[in-house]
Amino acid sequence: MRVLVLGQGKTGKLVAEVAAERGHSVHVLDAKENANASALTPPFVAGFDVVIDFTSPEAVVQNMKAVLATGAKMVVGTTGWYDRLQNARELVERKQAGLLYGTNFSIGVQVMLQLASKMGELLKSAGYKFSIEETHHVTKLDSPSGTAISLSEVVKRSTGIGEVPITAHRVGDAAGTHVLEAKSDADKLVLTHESYSRRSFAEGAVRAAEWLSTRTGCYDFQDVYSQM
């Protein structure tokens, strides 16, 4: 498989390494080479089976427009752009393209989301108050993290409560920690996911690209990860 990786940050570099380890041909574009999606011309994009984006909330929207307009396949690990999701869905449908997006490509986080849903379901009528705390590296651009927002949405759906407060921290080179707390007057239950390495994100993104390479349509990693 021919893979184009957009973004040469820490996760983007690791995605390229993992893709190469899995036997794929890899080309990487950094922000300077692809300002305003200028490098993503139809002939250039046509040279790849899947495009993987780990850039920034500002860059990813233009990148998606350019890539999906050609009918190509794209995996997006960048977060902070979901207010444009409906526009992306419509473009995918019009162009018969493929888009797989996710707030977190770690399998452990996907399991955490399932457990969070179960926590909310079982505790919703027991007087518990839910809160989320997340910690990431200082260069992470979106705050709170997309994963924290996903956790919040899962808990809100399963409990019916209106809001789940999120506290965000940016510290050093932290790969990422998410803590969901359910607290009552008598006790508390804590669910934690701590990343030691970005490799789990990179491996998940490459597996997602392999899965998407034979499909069209728009997919949330949370809904399809078990198929990989």
Image: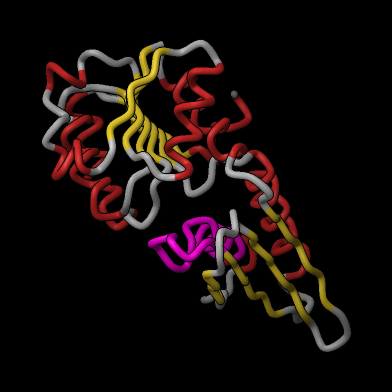
Give the quarter of the figure containing the N terminus: top left
**Range of the magenta residues?**
136-155
Magenta span has 146?
yes
Q: Position of residue 153 (x, y in %)?
A: 53, 61
Determine whether, in the image, residue 18 is placed left or right of residue 47.
right
Determine whether, in the image, residue 27 is placed left or right of residue 184.
left
Give the quarter of the figure containing the C terminus: top right
Residue at image location 69% in from the left, 58% down from the top? 116
Q: Position of residue 21 (x, y in %)?
A: 55, 17
Determine whether, in the image, residue 101 is placed left or right of residue 190.
left
Magenta span has 198?
no
Farthest residue toward the bottom?
Answer: 185
Determine whether, in the image, residue 197 is placed left or right of residue 144.
right
Q: Position of residue 23 (x, y in %)?
A: 51, 11
Task: Name the one closer to the observer, 181 or 50.
Answer: 50
Residue at image location 19% in from the left, 36% down from the top? 33
Residue at image location 73% in from the left, 53% down from the top? 115
